[in-house]
Amino acid sequence: MIFINFKTYQQGTGEASLSLAKICLEVASQTGIKIIPIVQVADVWRLTNQGLDVWAQAVDAIEFGAHTGGILPEAVLAAGAKGILLNHSEKKLSLAEIEKILGKLNNCQTLVCTDSLSEGQTITNFKPTFLAYEPSELIGGEVSVSQARPEMIKEFIDSINEVPILVGAGVHTSQDVKKALELGARGVLVSSEVVLATDPKQALLNLTKGFK
Ligand code: G3P
């Protein structure tokens, strides 16, 4: 599977999020590979309203009540998000917040990011659907996690059996994807290679070749 994190890039915001999500789902049905757009919370309803399956980028550890500006998990689910990304290195949470949110989201898919094995092991106890290893220093760069940290990917996969592991950061080529899968990852998280591409469809099709 390939998760495409739209972040807050202009190319994945507002109306542009609709065309990019359609491309992701079109490539998914063309290739048979599960491709999941992870969009800004403000764009979730715009897309689910059109019948598109998307995930949201974050929620806060809050309840119904007086939390002006907060991202209420229940509201994101009511907007139709099929899953929720948590603890991205650009939107870190405390372990207590992750535990609280995952406790509320037991009917929804979740993907929790981490850049350390010890944090990953603790998060596993809170039962996310997926765990993603993303070394923050490689995010948005040219060198992929598969090239730079193969031994860490292996260690994650050997040490954590309870939850499927994905990897992300700097993934640009089908070779990066292939290597991650060979090391035992279930899939990859990608942003800039697809969201910032001149031709996002082609960029995504290129990445799917790593599954062959
Ligand atoms: O969540 C995925 C993201 O952090 C990776 O970003 O631009 O390195 O693919 P990028």
Image (cartoon, rainbow, N blue to C red):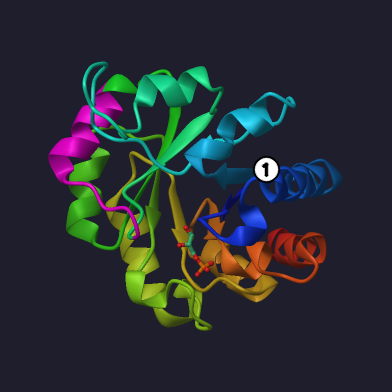
Q: Nearer the viewer, residue 55 or 206?
A: 55
Residue visible at 68% across and 23% down in the picture: 49
Q: Which residue is mark 1?
A: 34
Give the position of the C terminus as an image quadrant.
bottom right
Residue 117, how many percent across, how many down?
Answer: 23, 59
Report the span colored magenta: 90-103
Q: Secondary structure at mark 1?
A: loop
Residue 180, how many percent across, how many down?
Answer: 53, 65
Badge 1 residue CB within 8 Å of ligand 1: no
Along the horizontal axis of the image, is 193 left or right of 189?
right
Along the horizontal axis of the image, is 23 left or right of 82?
right
Amino acid on which disc 1 is placed: Lys
Q: Is residue 16 visible?
A: yes
Residue visible at 63% across and 70% down in the picture: 193
Q: Is residue 103 above or below residue 146?
A: above
Q: Residue furthest right?
A: 30
Q: Nearer the viewer, residue 39 or 116?
A: 39
Q: Is residue 183 above or below residue 107?
A: below
Q: Nearer the viewer, residue 162 or 99?
A: 99
Quadrant position of residue 70: top left
Q: Main secondary structure of the magenta part?
A: helix
